[in-house]
Image (cartoon, rainbow, N blue to C red):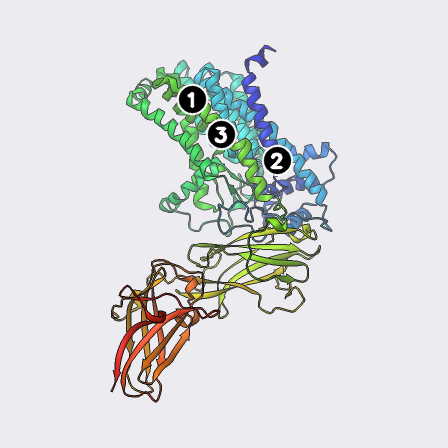
Amino acid sequence: MQTLRTHKRLLLLLVLFVLGAVAQMVVLPPAEGSDEILHFTYVESLRNQNRLPDRAAHASNCTLQESGQPPLTYALGALWLNMLNVPPVDCLGALHYFAFIHNPWVNPMDAWNRVDNAGAFMRVQNVQDYPQATINESIALLRFISLPFGILAVIAAYGSGYEIFGRRSWALLTAAIFAFMPMMMHIASYWTNDITAIAFASLIVWCLLRLLRLGASHRRLLLLGILFGLGGLSKVNVMLLLPAAALALFIDWRQQRLPFKQLIVNGFLLGLPIALIFGPWLLYGLITFQDPVGFRTHMQPKFNYNPPLTLAQTLPMMPEMYLTYIGKLGFSKMYLHPMTYTAIGFILLLSLIGYVAAYLRHLTLSWIRDFWKNPPAQQAAVLLVIILTVFAGFYSWLRQIYFVTGRLMYAAHVPISLAIAGGFYLLARTWPRLQLPIQRYTIGILAVSSLIISPIIIYIGLMPPPPLTRDQLPPLQGTPIDFNHTIRLLGYEQPNHVFSDPIYDIKLCWEVLKTTSKPAAFSLKIIHDGVIIADRTSVHGMGRYNSSLWTAGAIFCDTVDIRMDDPDLTTEPQPEPAQVYDILLVMLDAQTQRVDWQATTPDGQPIDYPIITQVVTPARDMRPLLAYTPAPSTVRFPSFADIAGFSLNGDLRPGAKLSADFLWHVTGSTPISWSQFMYLQGPDGATALTDSVPRGGQYPTWGWSLGEYIVDRWPIQLPDSLPTGEYELYTGFYRQDSGDRMAATINNAPAPDNAALILRFTVP
């Protein structure tokens, strides 16, 4: 009871940690944890075959690249499911099941869009030929094994903090930084061997710090060796802590002034459990596959950079590694809110300020100078070696394998948490009044990020979209289109008609007419004359509401991102400037990807090409396209555009073919598609020359953007019977639906009849 009272704040922290992990566990669908599928099939492989996966057949077996992973975590999982009498599942069948429900469009155009195809797997109902319920139950049960290992890791972080600081408040801060880092809590919420490796690595750090304080007794060395052996059997990167263990043994030997043979004995006592526990795994890999640590299963062309990346190539990847260390959730790795990363980054900045303040007070120099008489300096050296060796292993993988994330640094999560808390400790020594506010800010920000924000991010990214009523629909454009008389496009909301940003978004709103078992997806294509310059395909609900979940009468909307530069295509047509493009909407079979959903009007009339709207690519500044400088003009269309230059090219004679070149400077915008007219006023009256949407119909005025310079060449043919005399050339804009003309000025004076005089000439 006294122990409970003493550590009641630690118990509260552990309760919050478990509640946060369980919250994520509940909202995270089966297999949506990072590589959770293969960790699950590894367990089922052990249960069915009673032997380790065949690494030589890793390309075709059910554990794939994870075939080379050490077996401890998976053996515990198999034992757990057998104890609960959960029937085993054929692991290849399970792999095929996940392939069947896999979302082919899982990678969103905008990685920060958390509701756009964030799930790697579609929620489905009544999947035949697959034991879906057993698979989901097994994964849910396996996840609960992660919790005790997460609790062990948090306790080890607390113990490590107490070894460093000697005060429970700072030990609790260390444990809070460790436990409430969003990625740490997320790792504890799904089935993975990362959590067992983190637990054993954290316990190793605690034991090393106790060894430095209390000395290398035989019992401590044997315990440390056992932890190393079990950690290595969980994940090989735990062995990266061995150099720090060697340093700790050396420091202890040097401090106690023991004979050299005692150092050898201590090394033997540490290495014996490692050899007995981890050694057989190494020998098995060496003898059977000539691959002692199992790395070769990851060395595949589809996974590897060839040649490995250089330092210059890896440096731009470091911000992403920072984000994935703090927290990037799920199989497809959903980002947290940017403010979350900023707030946690501020925590790191405060810690760094503490170290700078200590350096300015020359505290660090005294640590180095008195190293052999300074236990904190010795502890810091061991912790630094852990961080550096784990980072070296992480960096080696980063150079070789493309899917490496900051999660691989979590074998050093305790030393990193201690380093952050250490900066605050030094800061509090300089400014004592800051201690309590900093501790509260740190724990508060991290707790909110992991306990509240992370589950919400997972929930909104993976749960089906909320159904809407008709009153909740936004103002829609376009006409309804039915597909296979099963689902109806009610209309669209198009915030912007200009396709200029890297990602263009449009909202589609749907109504389900009837249930269906046919797998559906939709595709938006931006096209001109049959050439596709951009497209986007997705399951409905942006991956969250596939057709097996549809209920008649359901109404929902999809905000669809379309990326101009598709990263999946090595070569693609580039959009032309000042060009109108159609947006075509089709529906396809989500499995075969054949366009086989017939589009019709609501009354059943087939629609061959369901074009729903148009976009334009901006003109921007087209002045460099001019081979000459046109004559300046004072013609303006207020709040819309000025004629910055004009020229008429060709022989001015009857029947001549001319070209009229306009240089427009856009000063405003209009939602209307105005038509431009030109006519001649001569001795015999007015003669119409041309009448069209600008740039031959390819750049309507609703697409013109403020600040653009647009070059527009009009072909003109003068009448064959053109009497001798003086002529005036007029232009202007009018609405095709009403005939109303746009206001025009010349020299800032209104143009008569809103027809602007742009040129006078004489026909001899």
Residue 361 drawn above or below residue 238: above
Of badges 2 and 3, nearer the viewer stands: 3
Residue 395 drawn above or below residue 758: above
Which residue is denoted by mark 1 in the rendering? Answer: 437
Does residue 663 appear in the picture of this structure? yes
Q: Earlier in the sequence, mark 2 or mark 1?
A: 2
Quarter of the image with the C terminus in it: bottom left
Q: Residues within 10 Å of mark 2 (few under 14, many from 20)?
A: many
Q: Secondary structure at mark 2?
A: helix
Q: Earlier in the sequence, mark 2 or mark 3?
A: 2
Locate residue 534 relative to residue 624 in the image: left or right. Answer: right
Which residue is denoted by mark 2 in the rendering? Answer: 25
Q: Secondary structure at mark 3?
A: helix
Q: Which mark is residue 63?
A: none
Residue at mark 2 to residue at mark 1: CA–CA distance: 32 Å
The quadrant holding residue 11 is top right
Q: Residues within 10 Å of mark 1 (few under 14, many from 20)?
A: few
Does residue 232 appear in the picture of this structure? no
Q: Amino acid at mark 1?
A: Pro
Which residue is denoted by mark 3 in the rendering? Answer: 446
Of badges 3 and 1, nearer the viewer stands: 1
Residue visible at 41% across and 14% down in the picture:
256
Q: Position of residue 660 (x, y in %)?
A: 32, 75
The quadrant holding residue 669 is bottom left
Q: Are marks 2 and 1 in contact (CB under 8 Å)?
A: no
Residue visible at 61% across and 68% down in the picture:
607
